[in-house]
Image: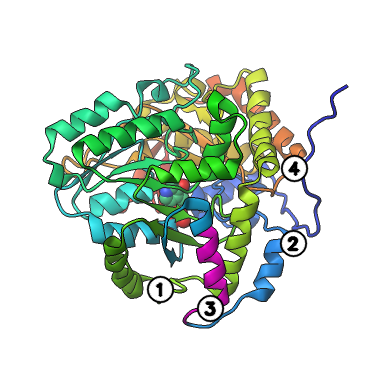
Amino acid sequence: MVLPYIEPYKIKMVESIHKSTIEQRKTWIKEAKYNLFKLSSDQVIIDLLTDSGTGAMSDKQWAEMMLGDESYAGSRSFAKLEKTVQDLTGFPYFIPTHQGRAAENVLFSALVKEGDVIPGNSHFDTTKGHIEFRKASAIDCTIEEAFDTSVYHPFKGNIDLRKLEEVFQSNPVEKIPFTLITVTCNSAGGQPISMKNIREVRTLCNQYGIPLYFDSARFAENAYFIKTREKEYEHQSIKAIVKELFAHGDGMTMSAKKDGIVNMGGFIALKDPNIYKECITYNIIYEGFVTYGGMSGRDMGALAQGLQESTEFDYLKSRVDQVHYLGQKLVEFGVPVQQPFGGHAIYLDADKFVPNIAKQEYRAQSLAIELYIMAGIRSVEIGTILADRDPVTRKNRYPKLELVRLAIPRRTYTMSHMDYIAVALKNIYETRHEAKRGYDIKWEAPIMRHFTVELEKLS
Ligand SMILES: *Cc1c(COP(=O)(O)O)cnc(C)c1O
């Protein structure tokens, strides 16, 4: 008999979970204006809001916290992190920032101008925010298969080369500062992009003289999918795949809160010394001096260690296996989920789950609220509320997919937690026909409304 799955670690410290009742949660979510971001963590039993900064650090990372050098300039911790990033990515220039969006802010301050267009594969929300804030636009060139949850495609994060070339042809080259590849593609369901596609995108970019950047939050998980799904990489190490992937780019931004397995941190890595020089000025204004950029020495040390661990095959296998275990359970229960499963999360297809709720009444958000009330599980809407309004017409943008994301924090929950989540969803799915009305927006911010939106229950 084949020995079963085990986590490749054991637990040295535990954190209590606060249990609660359905009645309590009904009160709390109403007080939170039906916005799951407004709940306090003690009101949540299992928190799947995000896998960002919510992972568990290893003993070796905690050891790095003690070794942290807090010198303002030229700390050992900076040198350690810089070397780790250079070795891992091959990019010679490294700039630390306090998190991923800060890296975007610094890089885009140097590269993005009003009226620019930035094609890519389903830009992440903060990325789109930083682009649109500069009066530029993000153009989604993801392959069509990504928008049908029932179609199997091993690399749903791939870019449709025809869509990309169309953008290149219909805009002057000087209006396209770069193409942006997100690995893995968060908004399209944690879906990876293949090395083959990255190569092809690079070739097309070269033809038009357009640089290529990576939004790299989950680069290690993407490398795992390349290794396990792309035949020619089957015998390559994760670190070799990562190196090859970044070799196709001119630079990257990173949210280290994901595949850095730290609670806070980010960085930029670059090929071009001139862009580096431009970025460091913005980094000093927005983030901090170039050898800390918003991170303390101990955090940089822990990140250097985290990057080593997250690019180990055993770790990645257990990570992805746990996410897929949950996905498989849901499939067995008949719950509509996006397939193939992504690397960091399972996505519920709210259009199929609660078709009785009108689209204008925010299906995915309605389902996320129900999951919280019934089981204390906090998930997040990846649907109409997140998609926000068109910056010109101010009309709601209805995305092709109305999803609820169950993001699994790294090394934080066990398989019995996965069982709890699956059963909670099975129960809700069995009573789904009773759900008929959704929610209405009472108040919203002009940009990135989902974090602070206030809703009202319709009846
Ligand atoms: C999380 C994330 C970001 C933003 O990073 P923060 O650390 O949250 O600021 C950008 N891009 C992608 C793909 C992400 O997942």
Residue type at tag 2? Asp
Instruction: Write down the residue under mark 1.
Output: 290
Callout 2: SS: helix
Q: Main secondary structure of the magenta part?
A: helix
- Magenta stretch contains residue 81: yes
Instruction: Write down the residue under mark 3.
Output: 75
- The local crowd at label 3, few if under 14, some if 14 to 19, many if 20 or more residues have their Cα within 10 Å, is some
- The local crowd at label 2, few if under 14, some if 14 to 19, many if 20 or more residues have their Cα within 10 Å, is few
Pointers 2 and 4 in contact (C-beta within 8 Å): no
Instruction: Write down the residue under mark 2.
Output: 59
Residue 396 visible, this orientation: no
Q: Looking at the rendering, in which quadrant would you find the N terminus?
A: top right
The stretch in magenta equals: 73-85
Which circle's residue, 4 or 1, is located before the other in the chain? 1
Residue type at tag 1? Val
Q: Which of 375 and 55 is in front in this view?
A: 55
Pointers 1 and 3 in contact (C-beta within 8 Å): no
Question: What distance separates the C-alpha of mark 1 from that of mark 3?
Answer: 11 Å
Instruction: Write down the residue under mark 4.
Output: 414
- Ligand 1 within 8 Å of disc 3? The answer is no
Callout 3: SS: loop
Residue type at tag 3? Ser
Residue at left 38%, top 59%? Answer: 103
Which circle's residue, 2 or 4, is located before the other in the chain? 2
Measured from the top left, where is residue 156 in percent x and y?
Answer: 44, 27
Query: Image check: 180 left or right of 154?
Result: left
- The scheme the figure's colours follow is rainbow
Measured from the top left, where is residue 277 in percent x and y?
Answer: 29, 68
Which circle's residue, 1 or 3, is located before the other in the chain? 3
Query: Image check: 371 left or right of 174?
Result: right
- Ligand 1 within 8 Å of disc 2? The answer is no
